[in-house]
Image (tube, helix red, strand yellow):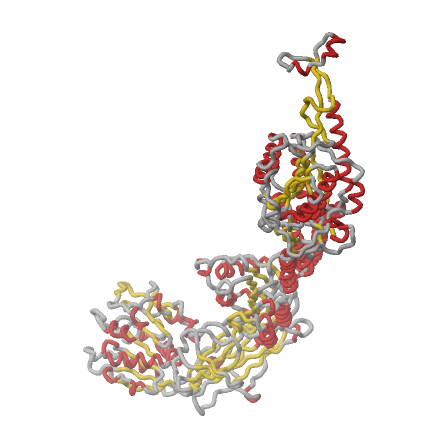
Amino acid sequence: MNVLHPTLLAAGLAAVALPIVIHLLLRRRYRPIAWAAMRFVQTAQRQQRRRRRIEQLLLLIARCLLVALVAIAVAHPYLGASGTRGETTLVLVIDDAIASGAINDGGESEFEAIRAAAIAEVERLSASSGDRVAVVAAGSPPRALIATPSSDLGAARTLVEAMEPIDSAPDFEAALSMSREAVTDIEGGVRIALLSGWRSGSLQRTGERPDAADRPRPGVRSELEITALPPLESERANLRLRSVSVPRGTILLDDTPAARQVVATIDRTGPVDDEAVGRLIPSVGEGAESRGTAVPFRIPPGERETVVSFELPSRPSAAGDAPLVLTATLDAPRGSDAIASDSVRRVALRVSTRVEVGVVRARGVSSDESAIPPAAWIRAALRPDDRAPVRLRELAPGGVDASSLLGLDLVAIARPDLITGPGWESLAAFCRTGGSVILFAPGLAGVNAWSEDAGARIESLRGIASEAVDLGNAEALEGGSGADILPMLAAELGSLGGSVRVNRVLGIDAEASRVVLRTSGGIPVVTMPSEGLWFVGVPASTAWSDLPARPLFVPLMQEIARRSPSRSAVLTATAGRSLGDSVTGGTLRDETTGDQQEIRTLAPPIAGVRTVLDAEGRGIGLAAINADTEGADTVPTDRERVSAALSPLLESSFGETGVRWIGDEAEGRNDAAIASSRLGSLAFAAAAAFALLESLIAAVASRRSAGRVGGAA
Amino acid sequence: MEPAPQTSSVTSRPGRGVDASLYLHPQTLARLKSFELRAKMIVEGVMSGRHRSPYHGFSVEFAQHRPYAPGDDLRHLDWKVYGRTDKLHLKQYQQETNLDLVCLVDASGSMNFGTRAFKEASGVGVDRSLDGREEWTKFDHATALAAAISYITLQQNDRVGLGVFATELLAIVNRSSQTGTWRKIVETLATHPVDAQTDLSRVVDQVLGQLNHRCLIVLISDLLADPAMVRESLARIRHRGHDLILFQIVDQTERTLAIDDLVQFEGLEGEETVRADPADIRDAYTRAFDAHIAAVRKEATAFGFDHTVVSTHDWLGPPLAAFISRREALMRRSRLV
């Protein structure tokens, strides 16, 4: 049982001491009197002591209960869980993710309802009762805005009032984990309030960690209560710019229109009965002059998705190699687009006038003077004519060092077996700073001892086999699972690779690499073990295959080279999602606000363009952060679905899966108020009964004595 | 009761005057004058008087005839009856003797209890006692009763003695019928009660050791002692052939425990204090008190002694008169047998 006014209850219960004190005080008021017949006094006292004690005890109990019951009645008792009554720690898990920012028909953000619910929860607390509150924002990455429960309820309210929706999807698992940490050392009642509109986007990430159910389950807290806002039921139409794809991440000055073609995918959530129309406005960089021509789009009734394409709005200038950001913005009527932030998508692009490639040539090593040396094949493929935006520089195997690699975007090594230990060290550092390296199998007949040297310096090369595999029958090449690394070529890999015959391959661990090309037997041939590091399992000669002589080789090398310019760090990521390993360090700076954020595993939760700074604070590139469109799914859910999605997370964090819906709680609270009234009346009635009982006991005792005195007198 | 010390142990207060009116209310004396104080038994006395001796012999007053039994002294045969009836009868006579009265007054600590206003009880408008008390104690009532009985007895020219006791005899006035005896008695009764307990057995032994004649003993006490001790004492008195009148002095408040406040009872004879609400223990207390009185009465009656409860809130006259009247009736019935 709990009470609405614990202070009154405490004061009332303290008043229980009054009858006890009065009882004790009265016991001391004895008037001394000289008496002769002490024998009979002692006899009577012995006989009456027990009865008198019982009578006094009953009187005392009746009086104490009388006071206590009045105190309970005044304090408005009610039956039910502790809730926020008494000394309670409330953890507000507020969904400030992108879906919560959906605009309703009145032009108001649905987050307002969540915020109001959060404030209402805070207002139900009482600092004087020792209530405390912690606040966790569930949008990815979850943030403990008040990590340690605080009794400063006003500050918590101010904090909640200042919250605004962000552009990432919620991560309730991490948020609940934070909530658990917030209350780990807390004693007393704990209430976890999950405040979300529970649209489909809010549940997108709840099943991302399948191992959650296998984790050790924490002990269930008996005084834990988990409540949640019920799911919003209203339909909200929302247009999402799901993707904006550019053929290459690097824009070269001589790119053809095909290389400048941008493809955008637009879909919609919510009702699909009506046609959705709008236009897509592309722009590059900042300023109105960079805005391209708006591209209209239309999603017919009953359909959810459409694809539009457009050419990159403006040709990059030749002034420099600074990266730029392509921004695509949906312009659609408000009623069809509830969430604005998912209607903008940014793509960070490298811009380069040419690709600097260093080719490591092994002079005088080949025994076959008539054969074309591998480096020649490579040079020919990289610069088939003078118009190719590729500039070559020859490097000696023993001269591979930091100075020789300076200014290069790509290093092509036909004979990695000739690279020395210091050379591998320099190549490893080159890769870490964004440079690309393509290694060809050296064509050795024996053991490839060099792979150990290489693997010792560059971990991703440890998967290279020590001996080549003789295929017996020549096998053709076909696209692998990582063919999309080279999007301009992906569609043609099958036809171009089919003409290649491979007899022998130096293999690599396919599990640890992205396979662009493989033999028809499944042996990887062209792979990317790590970002910017390529490995070709056949020599750049015709010894093991005819790859260098086939039409595939030139576009393959061209695409690899055009993907390689490394002098600018560009990053396109989704708010709150993993950054991957494309950027391994540095700082992101918001040029608008000046805020800086160290690059971690997760992208910032607010969409926008950030400047990538190196360790010295120099700008080295751009990062385009996009809203998480998966989290922007506005389709309403229901309680069953939400419960099913939350149950494993709650069990993982709290060992409990039960959720009480706040709306029901309100009804329950009304019931509790009614029950409180009834309980209060019962308490009053019981108090009256005890008052009557007390009067009867006192009257019987006093009448007996008074009657005797009167009779004797 | 001879020889006896002459008030050697009396603890009279210095400078305290003797005023018989404090003990004998004029109304009391006036009412008592109309009654004869007669002993329950006719005791053997050295003085002739109006009291009859139980010894049937050759005295002045014929008592009765009885059939001759072998072994009887032939000198007592009534030959006239033999001549007329041809039957042998002996003549018996009653001999008049003097009544020796011994008053034993309890001066133990418990007798120092009283709740009645002195002014009301004294009957002469005195607000307080000579030692400043405003309460009329049981001892005051006992001394008044003893003085009254002594006065009446002396008026009949019988010998009167007095003993004041607690754990032992504290003061003694030898039996005498002289005119100054009553003054001695009153002076002795001015003894203030002490705090000691009552040792009735010891006192009775002391008294009986000094009595060589059968006497009427008037024992005036609150008799709060154990009834077994009372029975033992009464048995000794009966065994020695003495008669006894028991006046049990009680205070009305003491009997009814009519007190409203919470009180701490402090014993007058050194008993352990008791804190109690009189209302709580009143019922049990009065039951125990009444049972005690009934037990004492039962013991006295069993030995043929009279027992009268005298309340300090009542006049002495009515209970004394009623007692003497009933005693006279009993004496008459005894003579007719």
Q: Is residue B133 left or right of residue A215?
A: right
Q: Residue shown at 59%/37% (left/top)? A: B210
Q: Is residue A685 visible?
A: no
Residue A563 in the image: state x and y as whole percent.
40, 79
Total number of numbered discs in the rendering? 0
Q: Farthest residue in the left direction?
A: A367
Q: Is residue B47 left or right of residue A513?
A: right
Q: Is residue B125 visible?
A: yes
Q: Farthest residue in the top direction?
A: B86
Q: Is residue B129 left or right of residue A455?
A: right
Residue A427 in the image: state x and y as whole percent.
30, 80
Q: Farthest residue in the bottom direction?
A: A319
Q: Nearer the viewer, residue A500 or A156?
A: A156
Q: Nearer the viewer, residue A61 or A54?
A: A54
Q: Quick check: B52 above or below A317?
A: above
Residue A133 in the image: state x and y as whole percent.
56, 69
Q: Residue shown at 79%/40% (left/top)? A: B33
Q: Nearer the viewer, residue B79 or B284?
A: B79
Rendering quarter of residue A509: bottom left
* Quarter of the figure with the N terminus of chain B: top right
Q: Quick check: B82 above or below A257?
A: above
Residue B74 in the image: state x and y as whole percent.
65, 13
* Quarter of the figure with the C terminus of chain B: top right
Rendering quarter of residue A153: bottom right
Q: Is residue A694 left or right of residue A284?
A: right
